Amino acid sequence: MLEIGWFSAKLFFKGKLLRDPIYFIRQTAIATSIGLLILVLLAQVEIPFCLPVTLCSLATGIMMPFLLKDFKMK
């Protein structure tokens, strides 16, 4: 398992893993910015900080499969 991860990391840093890296960066930036917006909005409420972090992580994790459904690798 570690060997597969190491091989994927080497391909990623060589630029040979992603077919369209701009698409991947754009979709990841969309999910990150929405998650950050949710975090900032929920952090303003008088609740413990672990709840906004948990909720924005959950929302971002749910969004990623939908945003990257057309993601292609080489």
Image (cartoon, rainbow, N blue to C red):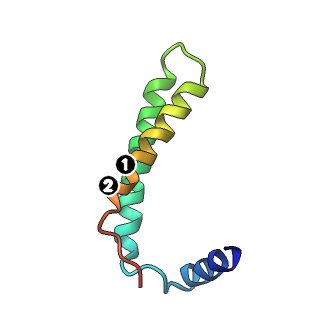
Q: Is residue 72 left or right of residue 10?
A: left
Neighbours of disc 1 within 10 Å: few (<14), some (14-19), many (20+): some
> In the image shown, does 32 or 67 lie closer to the viewer?
67
x and y percent of residue 30 in the render? 36, 52
Q: State the residue in front, 65 or 35.
A: 65
Name the outermost residue toward the left. 70
Write the residue at 49% across / 20% down.
44
Q: What residue type is labelled 1?
A: Met
Q: Nearer the viewer, residue 5 or 9?
A: 5
Q: Who's the residue at 51% across and 24% down the image?
A: 43
Q: Which residue is depicted at the point 63% across and 74% down?
A: 5
Q: In which quarter of the image is residue 19?
A: bottom left
Look at label 2 and name its amino acid. Answer: Phe
Looking at the image, which residue sits at the far front?
1
Q: Which residue is drawn at 70% across and 74% down?
A: 2
Query: Which element carries disc 2, helix, strand or loop?
Result: helix
| Residue 28 quadrant | bottom left
Q: In which quarter of the image is the N terminus?
A: bottom right
Do residues under tags 2 and 1 come within 8 Å of each other at their CB atoms?
Answer: yes
From the top left corner, tell me how far across and down residue 25 is, in percent.
41, 65
Q: Name the residue under label 2.
A: 66
* Circle 2 Cα neighbour tier, 10 Å, few/some/many (<14 / 14–19 / ≥20): few
Report whether 27 appears left or right of 36.
left
Number of numbered discs on residues: 2
Judged from this view, the residue extending furthest toward the top is: 46
Percent coordinates x, y for residue 73 in the rendering: 41, 79
- Reading the image, the residue beneath label 1 is 63
